Image (tube, grey):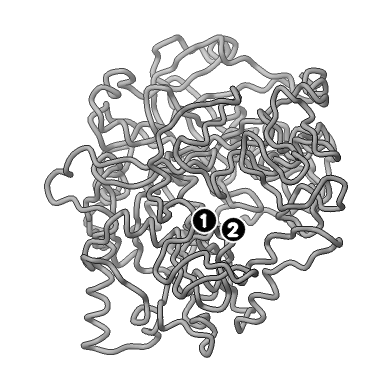
């Protein structure tokens, strides 16, 4: 494999890394991805057609979720939510606006103030003015990272008493299911917004061994607000290629279901009414919020999409005095955003997705004149419909494509042109301007000084629960030393003496997470929970194909049918044989499929040191005939 990869370090060859949860769901997941990026930089495969490092997301529209800032310390467009240390707008902008470290570089994040001020104008409209720092004081300021591991730990300690759960099923999707149920049982209330009945919404019900709780002892009040699924509403879905593809409503939602926008609008208006009638502290962020929709209680998808794109709030002129947008018009490029309050955009990277020419996300021209699969007329990709990021790297120092047969962009003597939207300015070949325009130095980074929790260079660490008991490369530091492991979770970690096999969770073709067990056809295709083991492990444990087995970890157990398969084989690691138990994740105690156990009953409550993505792919279990 290494020889094949090395062979792609040539002008007419390239390779791509396609990664998904198999690489991210580790305590070193972010370092796995970083290592891939370093390899691609060394091979010269960044910015090339068919190159790069590309995520295969675990959910439809997870790309859109991250684009729109639905992470604990993010704002839309990959801007950063202020911390409590950034006491004013000036300190916040100084912390997030990089200064060029080399001359003549694009350093595009130097435009951060334009993106941020335009966001605040979108959030707060006329209430955001230069005199009040564009409403900076109204944004929440974080004191620590409130990821889901931290949040549920706070529930466990009684520091969180209410929970809004929108489009998430933590009882099934979060590690250490028994702890999750215990945490939810300590809440005063929980609001679940979901189109389906989830295990989270019914966590308080007893389902025998799979959810053995006492409903009478659980005082959590659960409010279920049924929402719509994607086929019951208009909107866009963003894929891993950053394409925003518009889709249209297929049918009305059943019963009392409402779309998420309508539900959130209702909560918003009720909160405003309560504050207006009863008063309260810290109400300005809510009361000053801009809410300019034709139907205030039911914002439409096109209105929100245009808000993401952005508007001119005054007539806009370029540096030469040429009018580029009239007041009230939709913007066509984030290059038009300003930091003086004359533009508004709630997601700067989406600027250009809905212009005065219409909804670019609805484009459906699949022609591909280049033959590279670069269909610029199909949908719209951020940024500015560019399909390959850093595509200046696909051409040599003279502006000629490394591979003429797979030309993305080239210098034609006066400008950059080609089969993609150039990810570069107007700098001619031969200038010092580097291709990696989002970096202040214009270059790719093999050595990242302050970006990764573990340090600037990747290192191998074993999982927190390792079957080896040591690290073959450095036995004094076995697992990632900078992971955040809470004391109560550390007590729930197993050892190889009691749990000698590696458990790993994964998905099946016939199912999608814990959703499709509600769909009869999917339930028929894969009706019953099973686990997979190798022929050698089956022989050692006296397990036959079709036997009922119990799989256990330090955190709990599940029961399932055993599938003995040649697809799993023992591994020889550091001179010892390591067996794997494969655990599909799709079953639970809701849906039309046969009732099963939550696979995450087994998984450990510890995450990657950078992203806090839980370590679902490697943990310790035992297996016995049931």
Determine the residue located farthest toward the left in the rendered image. Answer: 255
Indicate the position of residue 348 as horizontal and vertical percent values: 53, 60
Q: Residue at x 66, y 36 (%)?
A: 418
Q: Is residue 534 visible?
A: yes
Judge by depth and name the residue closer to the eye, 354 or 132.
354
Q: CA distance from mark 1 to mark 2?
A: 9 Å
User: Quick check: 338 left or right of 284?
Assistant: right
In this rendering, the answer to whether 161 lies above or below 411 is below
Quarter of the picture containing the N terminus is: top right
Q: Which residue is mark 1?
A: 149
Label of residue 418 in the image: none
**In this view, the mark in front (1 or 2):** 1
User: Residue 392: which quarter of the image?
Assistant: top right
Q: Is residue 464 visible?
A: no
In this rendering, the answer to whether 153 lies above or below 238 is below
For disc 1, the neighbor class at 10 Å (few under 14, some 14 to 19, many from 20) is many
Indicate the position of residue 205 as horizontal and vertical percent values: 24, 47
């Amino acid at each position: 494999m290494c020889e094949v990869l090395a062979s792609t370090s040539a002008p007419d060859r390239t390779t791509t890394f396609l990664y998904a949860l198999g690489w991210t769901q580790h305590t070193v997941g972010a370092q796995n991805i970083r290592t891939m990026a370093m390899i691609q930089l060394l091979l010269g495969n960044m910015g090339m057609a068919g190159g790069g490092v590309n995520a295969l997301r675990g959910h439809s529209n997870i790309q859109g979720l991250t684009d729109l800032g639905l992470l604990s310390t993010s704002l839309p467009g990959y801007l950063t939510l202020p911390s409590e240390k950034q006491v004013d707008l000036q300190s916040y902008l100084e912390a997030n606006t990089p200064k060029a470290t080399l001359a003549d570089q694009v350093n595009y994040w130097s435009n951060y103030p334009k993106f941020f001020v335009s966001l605040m104008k979108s959030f707060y409209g006329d209430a955001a003015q230069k005199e009040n720092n564009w409403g900076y004081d109204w944004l929440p300021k974080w004191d620590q990272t409130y990821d889901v591991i931290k949040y549920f730990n706070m529930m466990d300690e009684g520091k969180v008493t209410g929970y809004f759960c929108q489009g998430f099923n933590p009882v099934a999707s979060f590690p250490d299911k028994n702890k999750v149920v215990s945490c939810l049982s300590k809440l005063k209330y929980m609001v679940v917004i979901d189109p389906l009945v989830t295990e989270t919404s019914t966590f308080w019900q007893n389902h025998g061994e799979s959810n053995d709780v006492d409903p009478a002892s659980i005082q959590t009040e659960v409010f279920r607000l049924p929402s719509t699924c994607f086929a019951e509403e208009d909107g866009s879905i963003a894929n891993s290629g950053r394409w925003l593809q518009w889709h249209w409503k297929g049918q009305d939602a059943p019963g009392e279901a409402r779309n998420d926008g309508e539900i959130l609008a209702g909560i918003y208006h009720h909160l405003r009414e309560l504050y207006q009638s009863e008063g309260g502290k810290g109400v300005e962020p809510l009361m000053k919020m801009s809410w300019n929709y034709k139907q205030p209680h039911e914002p439409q998808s096109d209105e929100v999409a245009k808000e993401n794109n952005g508007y001119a709030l005054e007539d806009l002129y370029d540096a030469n005095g040429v009018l580029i947008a009239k007041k009230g018009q939709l913007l066509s490029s984030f290059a038009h955003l300003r930091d003086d309050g004359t533009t508004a955009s709630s997601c700067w990277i989406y600027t250009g997705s809905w212009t005065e020419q219409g909804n670019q996300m609805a484009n459906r021209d699949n022609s591909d004149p280049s033959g590279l699969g670069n269909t610029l007329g199909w949908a719209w990709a951020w940024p500015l419909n560019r399909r390959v990021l850093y595509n200046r790297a696909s051409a040599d120092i003279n502006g000629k494509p490394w591979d003429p047969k797979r030309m993305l962009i080239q210098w034609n003597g006066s400008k950059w042109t080609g089969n993609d939207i150039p990810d570069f300015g107007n700098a001619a070949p031969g200038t010092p301007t580097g291709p990696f325009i989002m970096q202040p130095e214009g270059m790719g980074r093999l050595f990242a000084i302050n970006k990764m929790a573990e340090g600037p260079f990747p290192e191998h660490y074993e999982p927190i629960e390792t079957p080896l008991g040591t690290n073959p490369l450095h036995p004094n530091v076995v697992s990632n030393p900078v992971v955040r492991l809470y004391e109560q979770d550390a007590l729930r970690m197993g050892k190889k003496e009691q749990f000698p096999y590696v458990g790993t969770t994964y998905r099946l073709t016939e199912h999608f997470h814990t959703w499709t067990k509600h769909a009869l056809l999917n339930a028929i295709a894969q009706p019953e929970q099973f686990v997979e083991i190798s022929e050698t492990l089956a022989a050692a444990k006296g397990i036959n194909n079709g036997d009922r087995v119990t799989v256990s970890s330090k955190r709990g157990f599940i029961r399932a049918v055993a599938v003995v398969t040649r697809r799993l084989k023992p591994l020889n690691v550091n001179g010892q044989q390591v067996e794997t138990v494969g655990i599909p994740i799709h079953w639970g105690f809701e849906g039309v499929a046969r009732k099963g156990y939550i696979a995450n009953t087994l998984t450990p409550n510890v995450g990657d040191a950078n992203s806090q993505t839980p370590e679902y792919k490697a943990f310790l279990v035992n297996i016995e005939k049931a």
